[in-house]
Image: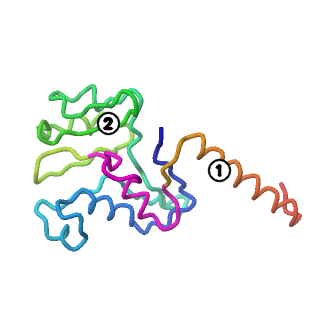
């Protein structure tokens, strides 16, 4: 099962992922068209700046195994696929009570105040790769199997260590 993986060390804070997300969730699926839509399309990925470390970090829904947002939704507007764990949102059933947002441990459920509904990541089910991942120019967001991501991170770390040893800068 593929997950959206975050590599904060690669994030430039350009917010391309946020724009691509909002455009993908717009009616027109076009940047120029989305700007004129009412209500304005909302992003479901957030880039947060961490001043203590002077870095930007893309934040995405974790589609938690035991998703609290699903269990507290009074109308069943949120549901979770038993196999993929992807939490989906049915806007027609949403009453905008924001209970889901109040229990999300990661703050990943946003609001569309004009439409009075919650908005959250759906991993772009109509795309092979989520829009946020496809738009990221530095690879700070990836869409991979967890095992594949771990292997690539280990290989990168080994390469960095090898370069340090060769250059005489090992720890």
Looking at the rendering, which quadrant does residue 148 occupy? top right
Q: Which residues are magenta?
A: 120-141
Looking at the rendering, which quadrant does residue 132 occupy? bottom left
Report the residue at 19% width, 29% height from top.
76
Work out which quarter of the rendered image holds the C terminus and state it: bottom right
- From the image, tell me which residue sits under label 1: 152
- Closer to the camera, 4 or 68? 4
- Residue 131: horizontal and vertical position, in percent? 36, 58
Report the residue at 32% width, 29% height from top.
68
Q: CA distance from mark 1 to mark 2?
A: 27 Å
- Closer to the camera, 7 or 128? 128
**Does the magenta-highlighted stretch encompass residue 127?**
yes
First in sequence: mark 1 vs mark 2: 2
Looking at the image, do the residues carrying marks 1 and 2 touch, with CB atoms under 8 Å apart? Answer: no
Report the residue at 60% width, 40% height from top.
147
Which mark, residue 15? none
Left or right, 73 with reference to 83: left
Q: Is residue 6 above or below residue 76?
A: below
- Residue 23: horizontal and vertical position, in percent? 26, 63
* Secondary structure category for the residue under label 2: strand
- From the image, tell me which residue sits under label 2: 87
Q: Main secondary structure of the magenta part?
A: loop
Which color scheme did the rendering employ for the protein?
Answer: rainbow
Count up the numbered dots.
2
Q: Is residue 26 above or below residue 88?
A: below
Q: Give the residue at the far bottom of this rendering.
A: 32
């Amino acid at each position: 099962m593929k997950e959206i993986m975050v590599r904060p060390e690669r994030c430039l804070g350009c917010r391309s992922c946020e724009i691509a997300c909002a455009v993908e969730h717009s009616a027109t699926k076009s940047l120029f068209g989305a700007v004129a839509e009412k209500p304005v399309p909302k992003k479901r990925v957030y880039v947060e700046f961490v001043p203590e470390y002077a870095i930007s970090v893309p934040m995405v829904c974790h589609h938690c195994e035991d998703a609290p947002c699903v269990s507290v939704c009074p109308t069943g507007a949120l549901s979770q696929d038993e196999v993929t764990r992807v939490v989906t949102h049915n806007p027609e059933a949403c009453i905008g009570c924001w209970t889901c947002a109040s229990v999300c441990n990661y703050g990943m459920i946003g609001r569309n105040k004009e439409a009075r509904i919650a908005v959250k990541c759906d991993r772009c089910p109509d795309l092979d790769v989520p829009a946020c991942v496809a738009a990221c120019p530095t690879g700070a967001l990836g869409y991979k199997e967890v095992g594949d991501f771990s292997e690539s991170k280990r290989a990168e770390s080994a390469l960095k260590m090898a370069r340090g040893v060769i250059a005489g800068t090992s720890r």
